[in-house]
Image (tube, helix red, strand yellow):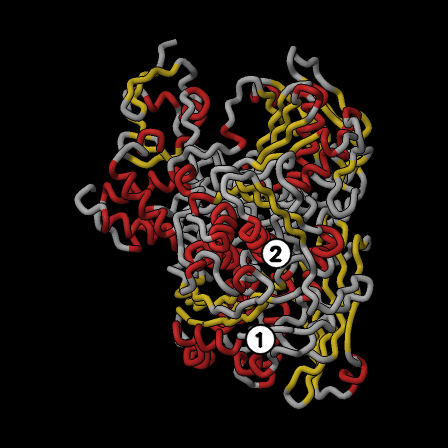
C-alpha cells in the first residue's frame, strides 16, 4: 500500500468519540430564540389570511413580509420561496416561523394560528404531471435504422421510490446578528458558500454583510447540499426581524416529511437487439421533482447521462424530464439521479438476456464499454475501464459465476436463493462544464511563523474524512508530520470559495488544488515567515468540452467504477429476503486513507441496500408523506446485513491527487440492480421485477399472483 | 413538589422539574450533558442512549419520575474510565467514527454488550447495537472496533 493510503487516526476522532463535539443543537439555549415552522396543511391552496393569537412578550411571528431582500432562495434557479408566497405548493411548505425563548410556548402559539385557505386541485401523479421544470434530449448514432433492422425489440418500464438521506443529525441552522449589523449564520451544512449566497440575497446585503460557518455536521449525503440555504435564509430573516439569535432544529418527523430527498422515477426503456447484441436504446426518464426546482436540473442531467449504464450502445436516444408535482421538493442524495437510471438499465439488460436464454452476467460482459469507446454524450472513456478485472475479484470472494449459474436453475421449496450482479460507474466531479464555468474553485494554504500550515478551503467535513485527508495530502507534499497541518470547519469570512461539498469532487478536485498549492509552498518555503499560497482550478486539457445545449462532450473527466453482488435467500412463505452476503469491488483511484475510503464504501453500499429493499416512502391521496418516522421509514440496522466484503481496485487518475478519483457516491449507485436482481433470480421462472425498493410485501404480491 | 434525586456520572444530583419531563431533555438542558443526542425522540434511533443502573435505555423514553434513586451514566462520565480508553483506541484504529452523531449512544451500547459478555461473537455485537442506528458506516467498522476492544481490553470487562 502506498504511504498516503496508510490509515491514520482521524483528526476529528477524539472530540466525536468523547462526545465533546458541539453540533448546532448542542449550543446552550439561553439567549437564543427557538424557531418553529408554521406549515401548509394543503398540497395546493391560495393563502387568504393568517390569523395570529396575541403573542406573549418576547415571541415573534415571521413571514415573507419580513424578508428585507428577495423572498427567493438562490439555488440553481430562484423559484423556492423563503416563506410561502400567495399560494402554497405542497403539504408542509413553510408559511412563517414562530420564535421565542421557550419551545413549548412556540408550539402552543402555532396550534392557535388560524389560516384561511382556498383549496386548489394539486397535481400528485407523476404519470399525469405535465409541467416540466426541465426537459432534456440527446442522442447519437442512427436510432431509426437500428430499430428497423432489429431482430427483436423490447420495451419495459422501471420505477424507483423516494429515499431519505436520514442523516442522524436532523437539519438545524442558526442566525446571530453581530455588532455592526453583520449576520452570522451557522449550522449543519455541506456548502457554506451556497448558504452565503442565498442569505446575502435574502437580506439584500453585500458579501461582507453575512458570514457563514459550518458547525460539526452529523451527516449529509446530499441532504445538506441545498436545504440549509433555505433554512439558513429562514433563520436569518427571523434574526434580522427580532434582533436576536434564532435557531431552528427539525424534529425527525418534520425532517422526514419536509426536507428534500431522492427523486422518485419512472423510466421507459426500448431496446433493439440484432444478432444477440443490443444495438440501440430509446429511453424516457421522468423524475418527480416536487413543488420547486431546487437541484432537479443537475440531478436529471446526471441521471440521463448514466441512462445506458456501463454498456456500449451505439445508437441512443434519451429524453429526460423533471416534472412538477405538489409534493415536498426533491433534491440531492448520494448518487444524484444515477441510482435510478442505473437500476433501470441493469434490470433491462438482465431481462433481455433472460429472454434470449443467455447467462445474464455473460450477456452484460459482452456489452461492456472499454477505454477509447464513446460515452453516452459522445465524449470518450479516456482511461482504462477495469470492470472485467473487478468482476473476477468479486468472483474470487464469493464464487459469483458458479452461484449465479446454480441459482438460475429451477428451485423448489420454501427458501430459494439468488445472486444479483450490478456494474456501474460514477462520473467523478461536477457534471459537464460546472467546475470550469461556475465553481472556479480557489484554495489556499496559510503557513504560520511556527511552521504549522492551515488549509483554507470551503469544503465541509460531514463524516467523510476531509479534515483528515486534506491535511494528509498537504503534509505528504510538504514532508511535514500530520500534526503540523490542520483544517478547521470553514467560515466564509476566512476561507476562499473552493466550491461545494458535493459530487464526490472535494478530494479529487480540491485535494489536487491543495497538492499543487503545497508544491508551491514547498518551493517558496522560508522558515520563520508567515506565508500564503493559492491555487485555482483549471480544466485538464485532455477533455472534450461539454455543451449542455447539445448534451455532447465529456460530461466527466474520469469515472469511478463499481461491481456489486448481493446474495439473498427468499422465504416464500413470509416474503422476507435475508441477505446472505454483499460483495463489491470499487475503483476510486488511489485511496487517500484506506480506512476512510472503506468506511465510505461500506456505508454507501448499505444505504444502497436500504434503498433497494426496505426504505419505502410514499405520499397519500392528499399529498402527505405517510412514512415520517423510524417505525415506518426503515433504514438498515446492524442485523439487517452481514459483514459486507468490499475491496478496492486501484486505477489511478493522473489528474487527481496521487491518482485519487471521486469516491463518496459510487457505492450506493449499483446496489438496487444487484439486490432486486438477486430477488428476481431467487423467485425464478418468468418473473421480471422492475421497481425498487422491492419489499417483503412486493415479494408476497408476486408470489400470490404466480399461484393464482 | 418534591425534587427528584438521582446519581449522574457518580455525583448525587437533584432535578426540580416535572416528573413527566424526559430524561433526554433534562440531561441536555439542565445537566449540560450534550453528548446525549436527540435523533428521533421516539425510542427508535438510540442516539440518546444512556446507562440507567447499568442498563442501556433510550433516554427520550424515560420519564424523570422513573429516575428517582437510580444511577445514570452518560458519555461525560464514561469517558473518564479505563474501559472507555480501550474502546477509544479501537474505534480510532479502525476509523469507526464518521459524522459522530450516533457515537455517544454507540459507545454506551458497546459498554452494555461487553459488560454482559466480555467475549462476544460478531452476532452478539450486531444484536447488541441493533437499537443504535448509524447511517454512515454500514456498521462493519463499528462491529470490528468492538471486537477489537473486547480482545484488547481482556480482563477489564
Q: Is residue A2 visible?
A: yes
- Tell me what residue is drawn at x 40 percent, y 13 percent: B16
Q: Which residue is mark 1?
A: A384
* Residue A693: percent from left, percent from top: 56, 59
**What is the chain identity of the residue bearing mark 1?**
A
Q: Is residue A171 visible?
A: no
Q: Determine whether, in the image, residue A23 is placed left or right of residue A443.
A: left
* Residue A97: percent from left, percent from top: 68, 26
| Marks 2 and 1 share the same chain | yes
Q: CA distance from mark 2 to mark 1?
A: 20 Å
Residue extending furthest toward the bottom: A275
**What is the chain identity of the residue bearing mark 2?**
A
SS under mark 1 = loop
* Residue A355: percent from left, percent from top: 60, 82
Could you tell me which quadrant the C terminus of chain A lies in? bottom right
**B46 versus A476 height, above or below:** above
SS under mark 2 = helix
Residue extending furthest toward the top: B1
Residue extending furthest toward the left: B155
Q: Determine whether, in the image, residue B114 is placed left or right of residue A432.
A: left
The number of numbered discs placed on residues in the rendered structure image is 2
> On residue A509, which mark appears?
2
* Residue A83: percent from left, percent from top: 74, 32
- Tell me what residue is drawn at x 69 percent, y 30 percent: A210
Camera-nearest residue between A367 and A698? A367
**A191 versus A345 height, above or below:** above
**B121 versus A704 height, above or below:** above
Amino acid at each position: 500500500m502506498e504511504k498516503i493510503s496508510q490509515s491514520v487516526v482521524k483528526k476529528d476522532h477524539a472530540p466525536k468519540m468523547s462526545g465533546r463535539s458541539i453540533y448546532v443543537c448542542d449550543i446552550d439555549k439561553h439567549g437564543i430564540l427557538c424557531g418553529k415552522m408554521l406549515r401548509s396543511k394543503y398540497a395546493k391552496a391560495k393563502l387568504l389570511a393568517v390569523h395570529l393569537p396575541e403573542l406573549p412578550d418576547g415571541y415573534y411571528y415571521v413571514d415573507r413580509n419580513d424578508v428585507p431582500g428577495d423572498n427567493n432562495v438562490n439555488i440553481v434557479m430562484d423559484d423556492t420561496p423563503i416563506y410561502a408566497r400567495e399560494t402554497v405548493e405542497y403539504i408542509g411548505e413553510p408559511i412563517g416561523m414562530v420564535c421565542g425563548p421557550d419551545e413549548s410556548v412556540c408550539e402552543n402559539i402555532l396550534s392557535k394560528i388560524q389560516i384561511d385557505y382556498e383549496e386548489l386541485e394539486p397535481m400528485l401523479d407523476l404519470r399525469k404531471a405535465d409541467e416540466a421544470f426541465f426537459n432534456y434530449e440527446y442522442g447519437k448514432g442512427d436510432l431509426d435504422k437500428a430499430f428497423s433492422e432489429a431482430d427483436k425489440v423490447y420495451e419495459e418500464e422501471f420505477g424507483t421510490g423516494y429515499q431519505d438521506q436520514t442523516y442522524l443529525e436532523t437539519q438545524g441552522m442558526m442566525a446571530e446578528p453581530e455588532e455592526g449589523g453583520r449576520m452570522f449564520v451557522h449550522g449543519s451544512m455541506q456548502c457554506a458558500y451556497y448558504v452565503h449566497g442565498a442569505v446575502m440575497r435574502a437580506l439584500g446585503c453585500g458579501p461582507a454583510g453575512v458570514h457563514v460557518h459550518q458547525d460539526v455536521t452529523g451527516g449529509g449525503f446530499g441532504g445538506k447540499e441545498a436545504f440549509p440555504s433555505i433554512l439558513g435564509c429562514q433563520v436569518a430573516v427571523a434574526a434580522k426581524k427580532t434582533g436576536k439569535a434564532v435557531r431552528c432544529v427539525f424534529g425527525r418527523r418534520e425532517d422526514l416529511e419536509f426536507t428534500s430527498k431522492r427523486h422518485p422515477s419512472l423510466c421507459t426503456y426500448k431496446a433493439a437487439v440484432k444478432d444477440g447484441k443490443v444495438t440501440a436504446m430509446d429511453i424516457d426518464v421522468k423524475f418527480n421533482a416536487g413543488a420547486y426546482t431546487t437541484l432537479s436540473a443537475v440531478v436529471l442531467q446526471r441521471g440521463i447521462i448514466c441512462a445506458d449504464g456501463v454498456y456500449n450502445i451505439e445508437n441512443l436516444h434519451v429524453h429526460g424530464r423533471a416534472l412538477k408535482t405538489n409534493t415536498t421538493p426533491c433534491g440531492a442524495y448520494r448518487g444524484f439521479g444515477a441510482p435510478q437510471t442505473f437500476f433501470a438499465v441493469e434490470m433491462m439488460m438482465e431481462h433481455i438476456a433472460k429472454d434470449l436464454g443467455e447467462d445474464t452476467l455473460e450477456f452484460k460482459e459482452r456489452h461492456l464499454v472499454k477505454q477509447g469507446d464513446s460515452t453516452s454524450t459522445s465524449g470518450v472513456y479516456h482511461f482504462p475501464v477495469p470492470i472485467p478485472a473487478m468482476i473476477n475479484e468479486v468472483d474470487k470472494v464469493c464464487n459469483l459465476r458458479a452461484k449465479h449459474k446454480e441459482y438460475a436453475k429451477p428451485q423448489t421449496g420454501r427458501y430459494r436463493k439468488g445472486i444479483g450482479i450490478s456494474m456501474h460507474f460514477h462520473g467523478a466531479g461536477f457534471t459537464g462544464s460546472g467546475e470550469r464555468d461556475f465553481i472556479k474553485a480557489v484554495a489556499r494554504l496559510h503557513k504560520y511563523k511556527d511552521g504549522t500550515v492551515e488549509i483554507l478551503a470551503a469544503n465541509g467535513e460531514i463524516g467523510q474524512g476531509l479534515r483528515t485527508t486534506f491535511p494528509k495530502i498537504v503534509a505528504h507534499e510538504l514532508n511535514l508530520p500530520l500534526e503540523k497541518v490542520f483544517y478547521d470547519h470553514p467560515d466564509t469570512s476566512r476561507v476562499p470559495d473552493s466550491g461545494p461539498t458535493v459530487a464526490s469532487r472535494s478530494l479529487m478536485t480540491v485535494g489536487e488544488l491543495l497538492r499543487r498549492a503545497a508544491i508551491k509552498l514547498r518551493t517558496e518555503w522560508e522558515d520563520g515567515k508567515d506565508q500564503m499560497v493559492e491555487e485555482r482550478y483549471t480544466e485538464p486539457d485532455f477533455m472534450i468540452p461539454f455543451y449542455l445545449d447539445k448534451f455532447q462532450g465529456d460530461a466527466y473527466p474520469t469515472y469511478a467504477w463499481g461491481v456489486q453482488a448481493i446474495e439473498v435467500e427468499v422465504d416464500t412463505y413470509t416474503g422476507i429476503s435475508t441477505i446472505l452476503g454483499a460483495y463489491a469491488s470499487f475503483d476510486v483511484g488511489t485511496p487517500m486513507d484506506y480506512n476512510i475510503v472503506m468506511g465510505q464504501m461500506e456505508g454507501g453500499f448499505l444505504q444502497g441496500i436500504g434503498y433497494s429493499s426496505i426504505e419505502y416512502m410514499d405520499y397519500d391521496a392528499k399529498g402527505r408523506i405517510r412514512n415520517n418516522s423510524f417505525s415506518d421509514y426503515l433504514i438498515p440496522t446492524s442485523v439487517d446485513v452481514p459483514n459486507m466484503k468490499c475491496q478496492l481496485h486501484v486505477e489511478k487518475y493522473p489528474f487527481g491527487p496521487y491518482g485519487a478519483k471521486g469516491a463518496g457516491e459510487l457505492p450506493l449507485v449499483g446496489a438496487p440492480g444487484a439486490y432486486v436482481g438477486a430477488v428476481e433470480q431467487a423467485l425464478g421462472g418468468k418473473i421480471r421485477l422492475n421497481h425498487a425498493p422491492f419489499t417483503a410485501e412486493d415479494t408476497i404480491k408476486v408470489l400470490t399472483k404466480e399461484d393464482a | 413538589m418534591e425534587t427528584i434525586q438521582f446519581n449522574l456520572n457518580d455525583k448525587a444530583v437533584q432535578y426540580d422539574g416535572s416528573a413527566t419531563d424526559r430524561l433526554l431533555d433534562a440531561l441536555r438542558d439542565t445537566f449540560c450533558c450534550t453528548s446525549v443526542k436527540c435523533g428521533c425522540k421516539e425510542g427508535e434511533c438510540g442516539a440518546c442512549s444512556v446507562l440507567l443502573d447499568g442498563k442501556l435505555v433510550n433516554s427520550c423514553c424515560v420519564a424523570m419520575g422513573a429516575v428517582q434513586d437510580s444511577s445514570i451514566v452518560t458519555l461525560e462520565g464514561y469517558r473518564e474510565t479505563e474501559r472507555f480508553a480501550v474502546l477509544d483506541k479501537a474505534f480510532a484504529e479502525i476509523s469507526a467514527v464518521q459524522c459522530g452523531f450516533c457515537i455517544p449512544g454507540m459507545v454506551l451500547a458497546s459498554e452494555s454488550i461487553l459488560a454482559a459478555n466480555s467475549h462476544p461473537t460478531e452476532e452478539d455485537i450486531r444484536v447488541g447495537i441493533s437499537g443504535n442506528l448509524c447511517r454512515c458506516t454500514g456498521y462493519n467498522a463499528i462491529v470490528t472496533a468492538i471486537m477489537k476492544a473486547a480482545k484488547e481490553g481482556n480482563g477489564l470487562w
